């Protein structure tokens, strides 16, 4: 009888318009918090806007949450692996935003960048379709969750790869889509900026989709009071700088992407779900939900009784201290070649 | 150029006494009326892959710049005279070489997937990979050359057993796969390769070979009469080319005889097949000389060359390294082991540079033989210590008949599939496919030119 290893926590593919607002950054911080608790594995990070600074922001966050670099030689030749960052290509470059500038242009007292990153040019980023596809191939069947908080261009690219739809059908359990308004409402910029891609995604994506609309984001905002209180452990924190740059403080930030992440990793106990149906996209970017028994789509509904718990989870998880992680591929090799010493604990 | 009423056929041979010797590309093969017509009797395009195992010390391989190739890092120093003929590619990835839930066995996977683009089945029994890109091209070219493809190697052709953590030796010891279950083992013995190329297709048994060796006659002696007849019809340029070509065959024969004699004196109990030079460089040169002749004579247009196999623990006493190659690559940051691997990598690249020099020295159709080639030199792992399958070390040598602008380093976006290169090369060889392996599209020749 062959030994079957226990399944690891779900692998999360996170694709977003990072830097356009602060919602996606908060969601990524939440995801790192969940990863630190061993509840999820962030297996792919990509930005759906064509802007090197957006990718650099993602890389800066990845490095921040990886913890301080280990001491020289601590890994016996096994340098720490940092994940490649996918970035949508094609078309013109998107403009810089206040959020991106605040994080990437911040310097220390010595004039050095406050948050290091390794993205200066296009080939420092990854082709997002190959990156996401490759990440999916390394997951157990139906043990992959996709969180989309931006235009659908990268995911449609994966669908269009040879065998892409079949791979998604096999590997992905759920797509949590932070875009739109449900059952109907105003047009969402994340849909408006890519109506054709959104239409294709919602008509062809081969797994169940749970959408998180702006009404959930507005109804369960990230508490601005947490920024000064819960993140104070870090002398400089990229999420704090992003948050403060997005709007004048104090404010509570609408957070649909955080809800999408929380639902994808902890599906029970925080939210209610709509009846099944199908989401359509209008030409002006508005979304319409039509109930239909057995339909592949649902949308998230706020459970008033759980509102405080949700917001508490947001604050606790997004502000969690980094827990150095090891690349899964790297772990495989360690087993074979002798484990290097554990990384140094994070200095506090 | 000799003007003849009737052109010599490209597939002409010298025949005699059971021997068959192909001819190089001669001016006499261009019809007189076709002079100036580019498409007439254009030298063929060839595709070859030369593979080195166990990864590379990448900070001694990658130059710290993109664009026009200038000074090359230590490992590639010997390639510097040829940098104008080299396209250095960065960030190509073989995702199918990664674990992908199959656990340990990166060496078995990376060589099995290198040209197939397939995640090979983890097994030592019922092997399964995919048809390799060289064999797809070979199938398309079948009938145009005497051999659809040649598979050549320098080490260990075991096809059974476990060579890496549950992966069959068939994965580590072959690059070419004719079908998803049929690898094509490389020829290791220079004598066997020689006889395959020039001995009318018959690979002789050791006994028959011994009988033939008694005569100690050159194969060229058997085709002497045909040679004289042909020479009488050729102009001075072609006569010189033919003479150089036949001399190179004679040189190879002499090298083989020397190797056989030397081996007998060094160690009569060694396990190596009869006739294989003990010295790596001598073995390399002998085999690549024959590959070169095979290209020159258009005996084949597709070659895979497995320099040594993945996971090999071959020592390199030729350069005073008695530790095995593979153990050294798991250096865990130790400078002395890194230095040894760097020297092995450099040694391999130096042999390659010698081969490139040879390919540049041969003229055909007004160009160098290398100009009508795409010779990929690379590995299925980048960092052998960590078993990384991204940013695979990859050189494309030769400009594919002018299709590829060499002399540059081009770095693609991360995770760009290696299969995109395979797809582009197959396209240049006349095989037009929508996708191959995990390709996401052809590496655009617009990028490469």
Image (cartoon, rainbow, N blue to C red):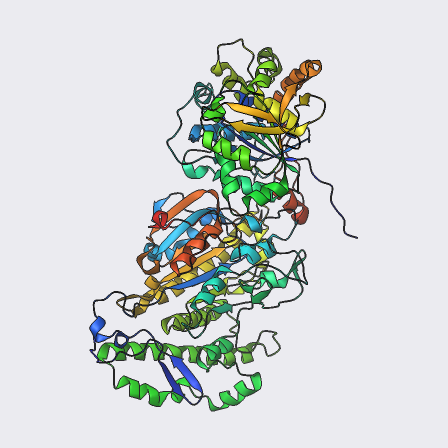
Quadrant of residue B42 within the rendered picture: bottom left
Task: Identify which residue is drawn at 35% across, 80% down.
Answer: B12
Locate residue A209, reporting x and y percent: 61, 31
Quadrant of residue A174 within the rendered picture: top right
Query: Going by the picture, which residue comes out furthest to the right?
Result: A1
Locate residue A39, reporting x and y percent: 68, 30
Can residue A342 be seen by looking at this rendering? yes
Frontmost residue, A127 versus A35: A127
Left of A69 or right of it: where is B378? left
Frontmost residue, A145 versus B112: A145
Left of B33 or right of it: where is A224? right
Can residue A67 be seen by looking at this rendering? no
Locate residue B308, reporting x and y percent: 54, 63
Task: Identify which residue is drawn at 52% across, 20% down.
Answer: A22
Left of A53 or right of it: where is A340? right
Residue B86 higher or lower than A278, as above or below:
below
Number of callouts in the render? 0
Frontmost residue, B278 versus A24: A24
Frontmost residue, A163 versus B441: A163
Residue A253 higher or lower than A144, as above or below:
above
Task: Identify which residue is drawn at 66% across, 39% down.
Answer: A142
Query: Going by the picture, which residue comes out furthest to the top?
Result: A250
Locate residue A48, reporting x and y percent: 48, 31
Residue A259 higher or lower than B279, as above or below:
above
Left of A15 or right of it: where is A51? left
Query: Where's the C terminus of chain A, which quadrant?
Result: top right
């Amino acid at each position: 009888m062959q030994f079957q290893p226990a399944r690891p926590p779900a692998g999360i593919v996170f694709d977003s318009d990072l830097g356009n607002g602060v919602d996606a950054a908060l969601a990524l911080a939440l995801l790192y918090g969940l990863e630190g608790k061993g509840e999820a594995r962030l297996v792919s990070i990509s930005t759906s806007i064509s802007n090197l600074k957006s990718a650099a922001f993602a890389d800066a966050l990845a490095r921040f949450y990886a913890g301080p670099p280990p001491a020289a030689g601590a890994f016996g030749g096994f340098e720490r692996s940092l994940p490649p960052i996918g970035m949508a290509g094609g078309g013109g470059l998107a403009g810089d935003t206040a959020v991106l500038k605040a994080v990437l242009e911040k310097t220390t007292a010595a004039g050095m960048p406050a948050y290091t990153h390794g993205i200066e040019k296009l080939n420092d980023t990854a082709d997002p379709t190959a990156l996401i596809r490759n990440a999916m191939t390394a997951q157990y069947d139906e043990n992959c969750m996709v969180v989309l908080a931006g235009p659908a261009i990268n995911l449609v690219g994966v669908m269009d790869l040879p065998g892409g739809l079949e791979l998604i059908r096999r590997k992905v359990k759920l797509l949590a889509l932070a875009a739109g308004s449900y059952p109907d409402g105003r047009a969402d910029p994340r849909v408006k900026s890519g109506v054709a891609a959104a239409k294709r995604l919602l008509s062809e994506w081969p797994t169940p989709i749970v959408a998180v609309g702006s009404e959930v984001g507005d109804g369960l905002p990230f508490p601005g009071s947490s920024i000064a209180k819960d993140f104070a452990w870090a002398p400089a924190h990229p999420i704090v700088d992003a948050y403060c740059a997005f709007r004048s403080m104090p404010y509570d930030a609408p957070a649909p992407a955080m809800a999408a992440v929380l639902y994808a990793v902890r599906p029970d106990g925080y939210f209610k779900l709509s009846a099944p149906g199908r989401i359509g996209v209008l030409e002006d970017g508005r979304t319409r939900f039509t109930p239909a028994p057995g339909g592949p789509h649902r949308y998230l509904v706020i459970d008033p009784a759980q509102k405080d718990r949700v917001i508490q989870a947001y604050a606790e998880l997004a502000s969690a201290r980094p827990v150095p992680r090891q690349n899964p591929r790297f772990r495989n090799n360690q087993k074979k070649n002798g484990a290097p010493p554990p990384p140094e604990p994070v200095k506090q | 150029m000799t003007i003849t009423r009737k052109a010599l056929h490209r597939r002409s041979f010298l025949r005699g006494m059971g021997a068959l010797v192909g001819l190089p590309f001669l001016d006499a093969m261009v019809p007189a009326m076709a002079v100036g017509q580019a498409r007439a009797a254009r030298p063929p395009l060839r595709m070859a892959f030369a593979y080195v195992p166990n990864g590379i010390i990448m900070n001694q391989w990658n130059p710290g710049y993109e664009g026009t190739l200038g000074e090359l890092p230590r490992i590639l120093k010997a390639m510097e005279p040829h940098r104008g003929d080299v396209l250095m590619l960065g960030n190509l990835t073989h995702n199918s070489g990664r674990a992908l839930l199959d656990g340990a066995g990166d060496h078995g996977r990376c060589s099995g997937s290198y040209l197939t683009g397939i995640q090979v089945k983890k097994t030592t029994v019922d092997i399964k990979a995919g048809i390799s890109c060289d064999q797809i091209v070979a199938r398309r070219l079948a009938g145009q050359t005497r051999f659809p493809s040649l598979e050549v190697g320098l080490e260990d052709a075991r096809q059974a057993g476990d060579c890496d953590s549950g992966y069959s030796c068939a994965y580590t010891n072959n690059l070419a796969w004719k079908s998803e279950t049929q690898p094509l083992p490389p020829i290791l013995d220079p004598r066997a390769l020689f006889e395959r190329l020039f001995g009318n297709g018959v690979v002789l048994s050791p006994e028959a070979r011994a009988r033939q060796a008694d005569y100690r006659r050159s194969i060229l002696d058997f085709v002497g009469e045909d040679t004289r007849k042909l020479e009488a019809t050729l102009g001075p340029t072609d006569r010189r080319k033919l003479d150089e070509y036949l001399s190179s065959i004679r040189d190879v024969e002499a090298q083989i005889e020397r190797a056989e004699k030397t081996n007998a004196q060094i160690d009569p109990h060694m396990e190596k097949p009869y006739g294989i030079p003990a010295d790596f460089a001598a073995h390399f040169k002998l085999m690549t000389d024959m590959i070169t002749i095979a290209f020159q004579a258009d005996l084949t247009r597709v070659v895979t060359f497995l320099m040594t196999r993945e996971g090999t623990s071959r020592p390199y006493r030729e350069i005073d390294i008695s530790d095995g190659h593979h153990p050294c690559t798991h250096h865990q940051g130790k400078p002395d082991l890194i230095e040894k691997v760097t020297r092995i990598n450099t040694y391999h690249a130096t042999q390659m540079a010698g081969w490139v020099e040879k390919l540049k020295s041969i003229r055909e159709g007004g160009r160098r033989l290398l100009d009508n080639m795409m010779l990929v030199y690379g590995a299925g792992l980048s960092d052998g210590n960590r078993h990384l399958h991204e940013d695979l070390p990859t050189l494309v040598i030769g400009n594919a008949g002018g299709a590829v602008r060499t002399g540059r380093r081009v770095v693609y976006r991360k995770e760009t599939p290696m299969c995109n290169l395979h797809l582009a090369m197959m396209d240049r060889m006349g095989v037009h496919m929508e996708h191959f392996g995990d390709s996401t599209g052809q590496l655009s020749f617009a990028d490469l030119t």
